[in-house]
Amino acid sequence: MKRIEITGLIVIGLLLFFRVFVGMQLHVLLRILLVLTSIFYLWFGFFLFNKLGVIDLFHRSARKNLSPFKITSSIVAGFVYSVSFISIIHNLEFYRGMHFLTLLALLLNSLLLAWGGYLTWKESREGVFLKPLFYRSLIFTVLFLGVWVTPLETRLNLLYKEHPSFIEAYKAHMEEPDDQEKLQQLREERSAFR
């Protein structure tokens, strides 16, 4: 499971770098990998963070190391990281609700960071388990804090410099979000690079 996670995150990092600095040629692949990674964390976070395989649940010796704290922490962390990747998708696509999801992911990762940091600082057994989650949450917290403080126009120009008509359609829609004509224009512009 760990290799799948590391490989997926490296590929996503490379595709994000390509998306920002080169262009949108691999945008669909990036979106698919972000969705699959979100699903991976949601479904397999428990196994990943407890260093178990699905088959290990049938072995009593593997289950002995599990505690209610480890079970709860790994499931919650899987959910938080899944929401984080969904938020990244919304921020790349400039979907409605991206600001809410950014704040939600920032809040959830900050809480996980504070919880893991406190237990690590106390040097408890639980802190040792949460240390890898602490570093993941630290990365996500910095990322979402950076997204939150970066002006919307800067992000639009960075991600959609090849599509100025999309930038204009998005700005026009944000000025009058209830205008159905501007919403339809935004949808048409967005469909040009799907």
Image (cartoon, rainbow, N blue to C red):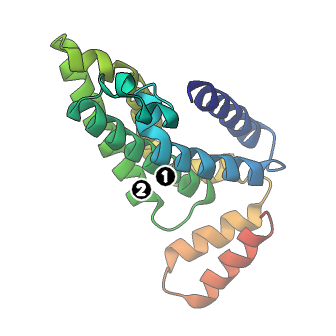
| Front-most of residues 116 and 49 | 49
Residue 32 left/right relative to 79: right
Residue at the (34%, 19%) spot, across then down = 131
| Front-most of residues 99 and 123 | 123
Residue type, label 2: Leu
Residue 23 left/right relative to 139: right
Circle nearer the N terminus (2, 1):
1
Q: Which residue is mark 2?
A: 101
Question: Can residue 154 be seen in the rendering of this structure?
Answer: yes
Residue type, label 1: Ser
Image quarter (top left, top right, bottom left or bottom right) of the C terminus? bottom right
The image shows residue 78 at horizontal and vertical percentages of 41, 42
Residue 87 has which mark? 1
- From mark 2 to mark 1, how far is it between C-alphas? 5 Å
Residue 59 has which mark? none
Residue at the (23%, 21%) spot, across then down = 126
Question: CB atoms at circles 2 and 1 under 8 Å apart?
Answer: yes
The image shows residue 8, relative to residue 118, as above or below, that is below
The image shows residue 120, relative to residue 43, as above or below, that is above
The image shows residue 181 at horizontal and vertical percentages of 63, 89
Picture quarter containing residue 7? Answer: top right
Q: Secondary structure at mark 1?
A: helix
Few, some or many residues within 10 Å of mark 2 (<14, 14–19, 20+) = many
Picture quarter containing residue 132? Answer: top left
The image shows residue 113 at horizontal and vertical percentages of 30, 30
Q: Secondary structure at mark 2?
A: helix
Few, some or many residues within 10 Å of mark 1 (<14, 14–19, 20+) = many
